[in-house]
Image: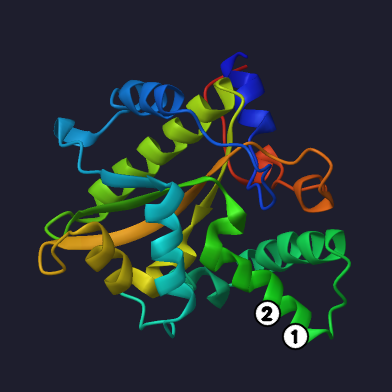
Amino acid sequence: MNVTEAVTTRRSVRQFLDKPVPYEVIRRVMDTARWAASGCNYQPWEATILTGEPLKALQAKITSTPPQQLEYDWDAPKQEDAYKQRLYGISKGMFDALGIARDDGAARMAAMGRNATSFDAPAVMFVYFPRLMKEPQWSDTGMWLATVALLLREEGLDSCFQEFMAYYADVIRDHIGIDKARYMFFCGMAIGYRDPEAPVNNFERQRVPLGEQVRFIGWD
């Protein structure tokens, strides 16, 4: 698989096969991802990847704990209509694929609740970094996460980024043994093999036209 194929076939997968992720594969991906770009070579990202019983034990804690106050805000873009419409567009596609009506609040909540168990992915990565890191290092962590996602595609694996997990930052930090005073918890990342037949993995997604995001100056 070339880079273009990895980019265009990557998507947020929300239904995984009951198939374990081999240790040698996930280790190879993470070892290669160390070469992701970062400003000043700080490499601010850190992570713990769980599978099997350690993952199930954490998920049991998450599903029995009320959501916490978030330590950072991911909803700010909704202040502008253009960004709000992009969110609503992808949400509509997902719920339509699941056969959930707009006015079925209970079914929508149940679908969103599957985030708590990372859509039954066989492995989940939990990502954090020291609190002294600022916006440039958050950006670097995003570039590293994108690199991991594309390397997973190269291996035939899939993923789903989960900022949702920040609702359970304290539970996660306690379970994996990292210090709250030092570490900001960022996100989870569900990892596994996609179910190719699941409608939620196949609905059409939209992207903003290139001309609305990028300008080219100086070419004839």
Quadrant of the image for the N terminus? top right
Instruction: Please tell me which residue is depicted at 31% across the width and 72% down the height of the picture.
Output: 171
- Amino acid marked by disc 1: Ala
Q: Position of residue 94 (x, y in %)?
A: 77, 60
Q: Mark 2–mark 1 contact, CB under 8 Å?
A: yes
Q: Residue at x 84, y 86 (%)?
A: 103
Q: Secondary structure at mark 2?
A: helix
Question: What is the distance, in whole Å, between disc 2 and disc 1 at their CAs?
Answer: 5 Å
Residue appearing at x 27%, y 63% in the figure? 175
Residue lying at the far front of the rendered structure: 53
Which numbered disc covers residue 109?
2
Q: Is residue 204 above or below residue 10?
A: below
On the question of residue 90 being in view, the answer is yes
Q: Which residue is mark 1?
A: 106
Image quarter where the C terminus lies is top right
Q: As rendered, which of 77 and 74 lies closer to the eye?
A: 74
- Location of residue 193 in the rendering, given as x and y in whole percent from the top left corner: 63, 36
Amino acid type at circle 2 is Met
Provide the secondary structure element on which disc 1 rests. Answer: helix
- Crowd band around label 1 with a 10 angstrom C-alpha radius: few (<14), some (14–19), many (20+): few
Q: Position of residue 158 (x, y in %)?
A: 59, 37
Provide residue 210's location: percent of width, then percent of height: 67, 38
Can residue 73 be seen here? Answer: no
| Residue at image coords 44%, 85% | 66
Q: Is residue 122 left or right of residue 74?
A: right
In the image: residue 33, left or right of residue 195: left
